[in-house]
Image (cartoon, rainbow, N blue to C red):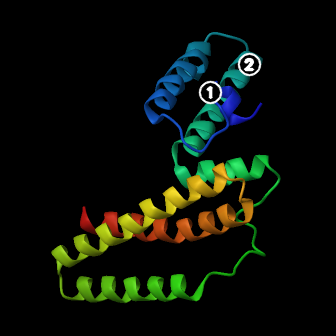
């Protein structure tokens, strides 16, 4: 059973995250291992496996890049294949510039500049997600896969910046 079916959702990129969370809580309450503490070893293992599957499905569907990669995977496309390492020069140059700007702001202890860079990257990430949605809706799998790979870079930088600014 695929993750969308597990949650009773249509296989689409755009999801109601609130609805996803509600179904997640319902599913987890049904199969939480604590509810099976007095049951047989088999039933306990089944509950643990189901809870693990529900948690993984929620992790995948709850993040736009994971969800896009999963949708592509369901279509037989490995968006994150190690053979797919080509990125547009403009994208790579932007990554290098951001890294330099971040390093400079950190050296100068310029919290305001770090927040500004974070917002710029977040805006680019949001734009990328909109393009990814469009590519998936148009069945432009090659472009969608490239956008997933690019999005991983932006997501990683944002996570690093959030660690540093909080």
Identity of the residue drawn at 57% across and 21% down: 27
What residue is shown with label 1? 7
What residue is shown with label 2? 41
**Secondary structure under the numbered disc 1 in the rendered image:** loop
Decide: is 137 above or below 148.
above
Give the quarter of the figure containing the N terminus.
top right
Q: Residues within 10 Å of mark 2 (few under 14, many from 20)?
A: few
Identity of the residue drawn at 65% across and 31% down: 10
Indicate the position of residue 76 as horizontal and vertical percent values: 83, 53
**Secondary structure under the numbered disc 2 in the rendered image:** helix
Instruction: Give the camera-side residue of 95 and 39.
Output: 95
Are the residues tagged 1 and 2 within 8 Å (C-beta)?
no
Total numbered badges shown on the rendered structure: 2
Q: Quadrant of residue 150?
A: bottom right
Residue reaching furthest to the right = 76
Give the quarter of the figure containing the C terminus.
bottom left
Identity of the residue drawn at 68% across and 35% down: 3
């Amino acid at each position: 059973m695929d993750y969308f079916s597990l949650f009773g959702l249509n296989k689409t990129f755009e999801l109601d995250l609130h609805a996803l969370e509600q179904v997640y809580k319902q599913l987890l309450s049904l199969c939480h291992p604590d509810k099976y503490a007095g049951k047989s070893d088999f039933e306990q293992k089944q509950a643990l496996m189901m809870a693990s599957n529900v948690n993984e499905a929620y992790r995948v569907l709850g993040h736009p890049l994971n969800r896009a990669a999963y949708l592509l995977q369901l279509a037989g496309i490995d968006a994150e294949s190690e053979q797919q390492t080509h990125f547009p020069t403009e994208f790579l140059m932007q990554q290098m510039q951001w890294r330099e700007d971040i390093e400079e702001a950190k050296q100068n202890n310029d919290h305001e500049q770090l927040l500004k860079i974070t917002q710029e990257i977040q805006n680019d990430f949001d734009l990328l997600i909109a393009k990814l949605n469009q590519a998936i809706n148009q069945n432009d799998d090659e472009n969608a896969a490239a956008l997933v790979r690019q999005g991983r870079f932006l997501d990683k930088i944002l996570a690093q910046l959030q660690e540093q600014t909080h």
